[in-house]
Image (cartoon, helix red, strand yellow):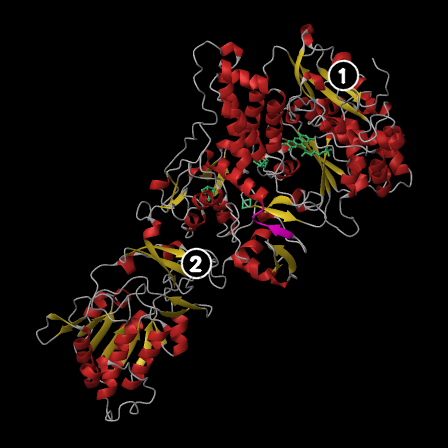
Amino acid sequence: MSQSEAKDSGARDTAMVTITINGREVEADPSKPLIAACHAEGEEVPHYCYHPGLSPVGSCRICQVGVQQGQMPPRVMAACRTPVAEGMVVDTEAPKAHDARRECLEFLLKNHPLDCPICDKAGECTLQDYSFDEGQGEGRSVEPRRKLDKRKSLGDVIVLDQERCILCSRCVRFFEEVPETPQLCIGERGSHSVVETFMNRPLTGNYQGNLADICPVGALTLKEFRFQARVWNLHKVASTCAGCSRGCAVTTEVLRKHEVKRFRPRHEPAVNGYWMCDTGRFALEAPNREHRLCGGILRGGSGQAQPVDTRTALEVARDMLIVHGEALIVASPFLTVEEGRELLALGKTLGARPVFLSPEPNDLTDDLLHTGDPCPNRRGLSELGFDALPVEEVLETLPSYESALLVGERLIDMLGAKNLATLPTALRVVLLECHYVDSPSIDVAVGIPNHVEREGTWVNVDGHAGRIAIARPTPEGVWMATRTIDTLHELLTMSAPGADAPGSATPGAIPSTPGAEATLG
Amino acid sequence: MSGFETYLLERTQAKDSHLLKVARGLGTYGALKKILDTPLTPKDVIEELKESGLRGRGGAGFPTGLKWSFMPDADKDTRKRYLALNADESEPGTCKDRVLMREDPHTVIEGCLIAAFAMRLDAVYIYVRGEYRVPYERLAVAIEEARTAGLVGPRILGSDFSCEIHMHKGAGAYICGEETGLMESLEGKRGHPRPKPPFPAGFGLWGQPTTVNNVETIYNAPFILERGAQWFRSMGTKKSPGNFLCGISGHVEKPGVYEIPLGMPARQILDEFAGGVWKKRALKAWIPGGSSTGFLKPDAIDTSMDHDSLKEAQSMFGTGAMIILDETASVVRSALTLMNFYEHESCGQCSQCREGTQWLAQIFQRIHDGQGRMEDIQLLEDLANGMAPGKTICALSDAAAIPTHSVIRNFKDELVEYVREGGHPDLRGKQPAVHQEVGV
Ligand SMILES: Cc1cc2nc3c(=O)[nH]c(=O)nc-3n(C[C@H](O)[C@H](O)[C@H](O)COP(=O)(O)O)c2cc1C
Ligand code: SF4
Ligand code: SF4
Ligand code: FES
């Protein structure tokens, strides 16, 4: 959990005070600045240097609101550095406050390069937003604008455009306060101020990407995302990061229903606060990998891979699993709770042992977010009753079974294509995966969606249930994973011993999906 | 010279007045001894200060006794407590604290000790402007002399009152004279002023209760304690009692630092002390209390030099440092010089100040160079309105806005003339000046 959230939760004990915001009496937390109370009330108060996850410095001076306290006449005050006090009357729309904000914007735009047409931040830039809301239509400066470094590399992740920077110092405070590895500072003074790294050293650490989110303008951008998309063309859905068992709340952002362009952190006090790590942020390769497995593939007596539709493949799988009844079910740690539940039911029908693949922890663990455990739903699957089995153990025990049902994304990666190829030919292998590897040991393969195409629940390391959501359509011919598992289960139920009375034959079997599909069987 | 009682510069006149033995002969440390020898309590000392009506000489004119009384009760709040003595003296025109530190460091030390007694402080930090080499050395030597004599350190003069005094050298930034910028700088950080609240009395140096006072303010304390609040009130005006050190510079015959009772008309100071405008020229403009107080017209020269009168004249007493401009001077060029100063000295935290000081300087530069536009005058005014009052973390932004307003209010004709005629008279009819890019 981020430390800012730790601060948040610790402060709840303080007694609330009653203040009036824009005519409404509200309860406010005196441990937080006035701006937080206004935002909690849904009142937009412009802010640049203030960020709810960082300490307030009150330097940009945009957050001016009208405040009346006690007998004093109303004043315009910086809401991010004004403590709330009992009886305070706040008017965020006071004309004088508007004026102060308009003036502040004029100063901020004085040296701004106004290169919005080529700025990655355009569309999410609060300098644009507030200028649109309350700036003045025309710039009055005829002076030459500051000429500074427009593309200064700050390491592998971030590029700095010093001309766009409005010197809010969020980035400086981020490194000081969140990963607690101060690396940025404001160099020079006054109108010569620039953001820079100490001794021009490149930035380090696994949290650099957050700079691009917290920078209110397009001064700090991701090398990865630079000039890649206009943000208004991105379709954004709330989801959960697949990078580790922290399961940070994210938005998945997809360009033209196709490519995942960004993962960005979403505020979730119980999990990640406002942040996420770079490992998760830049885990774009897996969801975007080409050559998806669409439909099914059978490897008949000829030994040739033969494409078929999903249902045909599932029917072959059913036959195989019935004949070679002693099966091991290996789930991917990316399966959702919902998928896991269905798979478990199927396993019960089959009398198979359910395990999930549990790769070694990696060395990315830190004190902030990354757990070092690459299994996003370890807890969810464990709680359902899957045993965690390390990769070697799975490979060791597989040959002692007659058949294997491998379900979920990245199983080929985790088990290793080479290892799969060396499995005994006697073992019947049914693989539900996003990708296919041409291997003689895989008898039936069926394509499933990956984690940006599915929905469901992952339970994180602390027991928090995070939702993953569908951010783009599944590839042509690919069924939802739950439907695939469900259909296979149904096929098995119908042909299971004593299946003449469907539904009652297998205790614990969940009712299969009704409808047209069922009648086909 | 006018007959009035003086005390501020008396001790500084003696030969070797900076040495302890000379200073003692002149009565220094008498007030401290009096406090320690009598049953005077810290509260009594603060009361005496309050009664005297002494107002801070650092610029804002805040009542000193009241400021001292803001410190939390030492019995209830057991944190360490400090005085930061503001000897950063960087306001253009101001050069009075230098004289006191250089010529009479022992009374400065005595003032610090009295403040320490009154506010029950643990230590005093003296923040000296970096360029003040001799004052710094004199103060450093004086502290060592005083320490050896049992006047600084543990159990001062055998009493149970102890106080340490530390020195710190600034590095040349005007902003480190702003009280919270000073504290940041003392802590070893950049001199970035802190937003208030919290105020220094509750959260100052290293987060501990702290009072910041100007050198001249503190210098008054021993005299008030020794001679009494009523004596102090016999000088100056009702609301601004006492004498002050008037540093007068610019186009005068005898620039210097003079001791003046508050409330003396500026004209009298100019004529009787500074020998009038030099070369028998006429007065064009004057600044009453350091660069941040703005340009006044000659017709305001009869204003009394005290806080209320100057406020009425739409200016401020400030640091009491008068700057005189004769009829040949250019107010536009002087304003440009000031704006370049504020642009250079802005710490850059606040948008309005960082961008505004640069913008003002650029506009004054263009008007000066003959590239001004009529609408620039309105723009100057709007920008100054956007920068102050109270819109930024500290008052540096105000300090740039006030002179700008004053030029528009009092010398608009000159602005208009520069725009119409093509800039400063020296430049008119010549090749247009190559436009300088300010702040690139
Ligand atoms: C930009 C700026 C610079 C200042 N510089 C000085 C200075 O050099 N010396 C000083 O005594 N006060 C300076 N001040 C005023 C201090 O903030 C503070 O008010 C003063 O030291 C308080 O002392 P006093 O109450 O004894 O006057 C400055 C204020 C500002 C806004
Ligand atoms: S780079 Fe961005 S976050 Fe950093 S100070 Fe500049 S505007 Fe603020
Ligand atoms: S007003 Fe100017 S000098 Fe003062 S804190 Fe703000 S930017 Fe710095
Ligand atoms: S948001 Fe309040 S001063 Fe920057």
Q: Residue drawn at (60%, 52%), measured in percent from left and top?
A: A34
B184 sits left or right of A315 in the view: right
Front residue of this view, candidates A363 and A513:
A513
Of tags 1 and 2, which is closer to the observer? 1
Q: Give above or below for B349 relative to B326.
A: below
Which residue sits furthest left?
A302
Q: Which residue is mark 1?
A: B269
Based on the displayed image, in which of its 4 quarters is residue B32 positioned? top right
Q: Please state, as top left, top right, bottom left or bottom right, where the N terminus of chain B lies in the image.
A: top right
Amino acid at circle 2: Arg
**Which corner quadrant of the figure contains ligand 1?**
top right
Q: Which residue is mark 2?
A: A266
Q: Secondary structure at mark 2?
A: loop
The reply to whether residue A60 is in sight is no
Chain letter of the residue carrying label 1: B
Crowd tier of the residue under label 2, counting other residues whose Cα lies within 10 Å: few below 14, some 14–19, many 20 or above:
many
